[in-house]
Amino acid sequence: MAQHVSYRQPPKQRGRPPVSNMMDPNQLFDDTSASQHPQPTSYTVQGIDMGLPINNFLSEPVADFAMTYGTTIASQGKDMVHKELNRFVSVNKLKYFFTVDTRYVTKKLALLLFPYTHQNWELGYRVDSRLTPREDFHANAPDLYIPTMAFITYILLAGVALGIQQRFSPEVLGMCASTALVWIIIEVLALVLALYLISVHTDLTTFDLIAYSGYKYVGMIITILAGLLFGRDGYYVALAWTSCAIMFFLVRSLRMKVLSSTSDGVSSHSSRNQLRMYVTLAVAAFQPLIIYWLTVHLIRILK
């Protein structure tokens, strides 16, 4: 009996053909999806590393240009500020009033508080200009250092006085500072207008008038300190002393400038010269009123 033997062909393997056999000549990239352990691929992005020469080439000229442009703008702005400032305030003239030293400040403070024994009230001159405060041996030259420091000290002392009396607040202190500043502006403008109306031709500048008006703050500081230390009695005694001292100082200082000026050949005994004397006396007499007005509210409840 013949046996029928059947032979079955083994099933075809469905595995992927080798990569080398599947390469398509038109394929741009290799297929690496069949790899069980793909190797990490490093990508290099051009231009990210700031240390590359191309980045230095691009960044350094930009930085240099920005620095040069910024320096030019700053220089132009500085020149513009100086130009606009010189239109209203002469910086060189302003420096003159701050040219002081310790000797001058000491003698000037003594002169403001004890002016009665001072003999020489004339300003010192060299050949072409007036002596600076530091060079003036008699301390007659006006300065802005003492008025400025005295004004700041007055504001600080006002804050202390208000704090002792439990009345301090930033608004009240700001009001004290603004009121004192406004009074100086009003006083200087009134004096400039008065000198103009009576036709006084003198070398007194606006800075000179501000200096003479600001010297009262030295007396105001002494008055407030006396009020804080000795009460109302000490306040009024100091007020009387400093008021008389500043009046005497201003009359002797301004008289050398106002009465010595000449206008249209007018003699020293003319009516116009009498007006100059009246203006000088009015300025001096106005100082105690301002000192009292700016200091009395700081010690009003002290015993």
Image: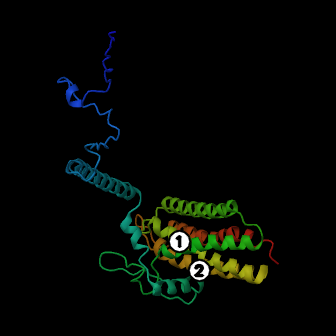
Going by the image, does 15 lie left or right of 214?
Answer: left
Of the image marks 2 and 1, the number of the one nearer the N terminus: 1
Disc 1 secondary structure class: helix
Using the image, determine if residue 15 lies above or below residue 225: above
Query: How many residues crowd mark 1 within 10 Å: few (<14), some (14–19), many (20+)?
Result: some
Q: How is the image coloured?
A: rainbow
Going by the image, does 138 lie left or right of 25?
Answer: right
Q: Where is residue 40, by image quadrant?
A: top left
Residue placed furthest toward the top:
1
Q: Give the residue displayed 47% in from the left and 81% down from the top.
A: 140
Callouts 2 and 1 close, C-beta under 8 Å: no
Using the image, determine if residue 122 lies above or below residue 289: below
Q: Which residue is mark 2?
A: 248
Residue situated in front as seen by the camera: 240 or 224: 224
Q: Give the residue displayed 39% in from the left and 73% down from the top.
A: 96
Residue situated in front as seen by the camera: 179 or 268: 179
What's the residue type where badge 1 is placed?
Thr
Specify the label residue 148 is tagged with. 1
Residue situated in front as seen by the camera: 284 or 278: 284
Going by the image, does 226 lie left or right of 37?
Answer: right
Q: Where is residue 263, by image quadrant?
A: bottom left
Percent coordinates x, y for residue 47 in the rendering: 26, 44
Disc 2 secondary structure class: helix
Using the image, determine if residue 81 lies above or below residue 104: above
Which of the image's four quarters has the N terminus?
Answer: top left
Residue placed furthest toward the right:
303
Q: Of discs 2 and 1, which sits in the foreground?
A: 1
Percent coordinates x, y for residue 176 in the rendering: 66, 64
Query: How many residues crowd mark 2 within 10 Å: few (<14), some (14–19), many (20+)?
Result: some
